Amino acid sequence: MTLSATGKPVVTQDDPQVHVGLQLQGGTLVLTQDGTEYTPYHAQVEFAAPMGGPWTAQKVRFSAKALDGNSVGLPVDLLNEACDGPRPGVPEAIWKVVTLAATSAGDVGITYTPPTG
């Protein structure tokens, strides 16, 4: 692959976002929607720190399989309608997925050292 790059990328700090993906061990979580059970195998958690505020989880997008083997996407909004706090009724198991994502990202204080040379 031949690729070149120039420039000095800049990220806006008004609404920084981080998306953390997790591979879930099969059978450790079951999601039920409209009476149908799904086994998620991947979760992507979206975190944001709007206007320099504290990091908050906004959404989880699950990739899951139904009993018939078909894959589906199941998004879960984590913020209430006013976007100023957690959405009521989100199951504790989903908050556990958010906690695992935050932990794996260093509590969203992601640290990274680029390769040298």
Image (tube, rainbow, N blue to C red):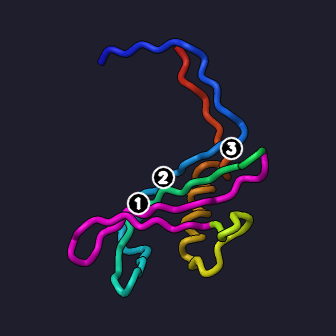
For residue 25, which quarter of the picture? bottom left
In the rendered view, does 115 fall on the left or right side of 24? right
Q: Quadrant where the N terminus lies?
A: top left
**First-in-chain label (2 vs 1):** 2
Hey, which residue is sitting farthest left in the picture? Answer: 68
- Taking the spot 62% from the left edge, 56% from the top edge, the residue there is 102
User: Dot 2: within a 10 Å radius of its alpha carbon, few (fewer than 14), some, or many (20 or more) residues?
Assistant: some
Tell me which secondary structure the magenta stretch mostly adopts: strand
- Which residue was labeled with disc 1? 42
Residue nearest the observer in this picture, 22 or 51 = 51
For residue 41, which quarter of the picture? bottom left
- What range of the chain is rendered magenta? 52-78
Residue nearest the observer in this picture, 55 or 80 = 80
For residue 84, which quarter of the picture? bottom right
- Taking the spot 60% from the left edge, 67% from the top edge, the residue there is 78
What is the x, y in percent for residue 50? Answer: 72, 49
What is the x, y in percent for residue 107? Answer: 67, 52
